[in-house]
Image (tube, coloured by chain):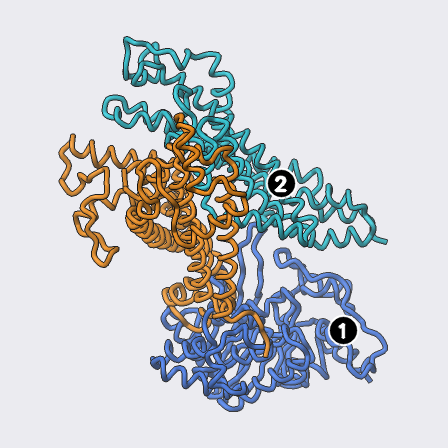
Chain colours: A blue, B orange, C cyan
Amino acid sequence: MSDRALLSVEDLEVSFNTPDGVVRAVNGVSFSVDRGDVFAIVGESGSGKSVTAMSILGLLPTAEIKAGRILWQGENLLAAPDSRMREVRGGEIGMIFQDPLTALNPVHSVGRQIGEMVRVHQGMNKKQSLAHAIEMLDLVGIPQPDRRVNMYPHEFSGGMRQRDMIAMAIACRPALLIADEPTTALDVTVQAQVLEVLISIKDEIDSAIMLITHDLGVVAGVANKIMVMYAGASVETGDVDQVFDQSAHPYTIGLLNSVPSVDGSEEELTPIGGQPPSMINLPTGCPFHPRCRFMKAGGLCDSVNPPLIEIGSVGHRAACHYAAEVATIRLAERS
Amino acid sequence: MLTYILRRVVGLLFTVWGALTIVFFLFFLLPDNPANLIAGGGNRPVPESVVKNVARKYGLDKPIAVQYVNYLGNVATLDFGKSFKDDRQVSSIIGERAPASVRLAIWAMVIEASVGISLGILSAKRKNSFADTATTVTASVASAIPVFVLGYAFQQLTGVYAFDHDWPSWVRLPVQGLGPNEWFLGIIPSIDQLRSLVQPAIVLASVSTVIVARLTRTTMLETSKSDYIRTARAKGLTEGQITRKHTLRNAMIPVITFLGIDFGTLVGAAILTETVFNWPGLGSKIVVAAEGRDLPTMVGLTTVVVFVYGFVNLLVDISYAWFDPRVRLGTKGSK
Amino acid sequence: MIDESLLELAAPSRSFRSDAWRRFRSNRLALVGMALVLLLLIAGLIGPFLVQDPLIQDRLKFKTGPDSQHWFGTDQIGRDVFARIIYGIRLSLFVGFLVTLLESLVGVTLGALAGWFGKWVDSAIMRLVDVFLAIPYFVLAVAFIAVLGRGISAVIVTLVITSWLVTARVVRASLVQAKEFDYVEAAKAIGVPTRRIITRHILPNVIQPVLVLEAIGIGSAVLAEAALSFLGVGVQEPTPSLGLMISRSKSFFSEAPGLLFFPALAIVITVLGFLLIGDGLRDALDVKEDV
């Protein structure tokens, strides 16, 4: 592993036992995140993106990790004891969640919650941790941090609250920050501000960001690498430019076509027909084939599950038997 | 915080005033001849002249409105007249017997809160274990056992059975009475005093302890599903730290509220407990007064109870604000 | 066009009732509760025709233990304990049902008025309730007894007055909540007549918590009567009351523990039975649990 590589997930499989059957939430996902990356994981609800993220920190006590490795700076976290995981959580990998109002404890001041990070991981005392909390609040752009540090979550506006959560997550200067839908609950104008904060923090402490989102606009704005997930599997990965401009998977193309463009240059939206698959009874072969407009009847689509194979440029992979054709058709449609 | 307290106090005063009006209605308007009752004529005939004297003395021959004003005035000066039974000032009877009731009530609440909450936390931790189911079952059965039956059972056990079967002397407890009335700082019993206090206190506490335990269990389980608990885990805290610093603080809020409401139940149960154990407090006195239809004493005791209950609820409201900053600061929200 | 039949999907319908009944039947504890209450009803309704006179004193036998003639023995003045228990159960059930019936009439009416009309009606009624509730339940009961005197009618009136408050509160709260439900708005929007909205959509939601409350309330009324009689201010001698029997038994415990034990057991079974039914109803009627 190069010294810029931080996280490497290999063939991760996570499932849940429910009364209705076994839900295979993540089926063989692999990716890696380097220092300085903003790595976006994109997919619909139920695609397995949140489960992937939370499995990294072991936050799903009811989940069964069936296979795979999660290598954090060379160490397999899935084999790590609880005490080591606790060190990693917050100390080396920080995480922020979708709704800051419910994700922050309502009865503790934000200063106390931020300070808790350094008290637990670095043994600071109360006074030191408070000073550090003020520093963190300043770093995320909260005005008058010395006054705000004693305020409670509900006293902040949505965007400010999310910054509080960011301040808390980076308090120990983690090398990786996982952001699970950080802007979904916010107004569009505030979204941009929060994203800006995330990027500036990343540059400031030279860390990486793993961004879970369903919003392609956000991805286009800040991410450099992307992994598209569908039905618990990654269907296309690569640099954002590659994946957006030279999309080679039908699902990715469908997603891009479903997004209205702000300047109104699209004639009509073409949604992806059909329903997301049942995670208990996945379709045979490629999980996307029932909804795929490129599906070849009589081909491999309904019998063999396509592996991720490299297409065109280095690092760009797609899980489609006919990826090259699809990519070509796509380029033709767009020109 | 101050406005919150002031609003609560005003609300309390209004409610107390309303309750006192009900008391007035009950004791002065409802009986067709209050003077007769006050003179002692509830259970036996009383000479006409005596009744007339009483009517004049208590102003019962005046118009209702005047009586009402007089009543409120008397309440303010704590003058409830004389009990015809003891021929003593009701206020001095109250003053004499109140400490015993207060001490019993406080200790019962201490037991109820500490045992109940601890059991609840334990039940929540070991959800669905034997201990947990046992507590739930005991809760149901215990609430069906009348408190006076429990009191009797205790008395028989420690007062009769223990003696007959030569149990160690520390188990052979006095079954009646106050005991030596020895208290440190007004509230802490001497060892001898403890021997008289322990049974009535436990019996009185038993009414609600298991309910408190069940409620605590529920709130602990509910709270632990909150988003901010997941955040705390993502920060790398140990389970113990999470329970102590995050779950508990939030889970206690509904429990505290309940303890306040439950004080009313406690007062009712105290009437029965004091009677069974011959504890010379306000509860046992109210029974005697009701039996003898001693109106002045009833009015005095009921009024005192209304004030105390109202005060306790005020304390609960205030402590509620201390626990939950959203209440304290108002959910004014965004800045 | 929105078809009103679509609203049937959101509101409780006839099949909901049978669904709830099925759930209730499968709840073992609830069935135990029903069995207990059934047992008590048989004892209370039919028992008095089958047992001896509870008032007759057998002057040859005081405080004797159970034997062939007196299944639970005799009490301190020679009366048959078993008969007294049966009559005591009948009294408890009578008081329990009557009080609950009357207080729910008062409570549901006032609570419904408050919840439905809102504004000053709501304010006035709820202030009244709050003010009454400022006096602890049992203290209020004892106070009423002091004024009204002893005996069973006084007990019933007293318990009705102290119990309607919580019912009113619960009814008002569910009504206010039900009014706000989205499907009620939807029904209004497509012009469903008010009467139908009430009977089909709102009423079922209100009845559920009230039913649970009243079921458990029967047990509470039984306990309260027992407590008042125990204190001597409720039912008077020689009428058999379980609470009264317990208070009289105190001095004779070592000789005749059954005098305390049997009435106590009867009370516990009664309260427990209704408690279990109430809990069972709560679980069976809670629509949200079924997701």
The quadrant in which residue B142 appears is top left
The quadrant in which residue B88 appears is top left
Q: Which mark is residue C105?
A: none
Decide: is C208 above or below B322: above
Q: Which mark is residue C108?
A: 2
Q: CA distance from mark 1 to mark 2?
A: 54 Å
Q: Which residue is mark 1?
A: A258
Front one among B154 and A313: B154
Decide: is A216 above or below C177: below
Front one among B146 and B97: B97
- Give residue B319's position: percent from left, percent from top: 43, 63
Kindly identify the residue that appears in the image at 50 percent across and 16 percent down.
Answer: C46
Q: Chain of mark 1?
A: A
* Secondary structure under the numbered disc 1 in the rendered image: helix
Front one among A183 and A233: A183
The quadrant in which residue C138 appears is top left
- The amino acid beneath tag 2 is Val
Kindly identify the residue that appears in the image at 51 percent across and 71 percent down.
Answer: B329
- The amino acid beneath tag 1 is Ser
Q: Chain of mark 2?
A: C
- Which quarter of the figure is the N terminus of chain C placed in? bottom right
- Left/right placement of residue B298 relative to residue C210 reads left
* Secondary structure under the numbered disc 2 in the rendered image: helix
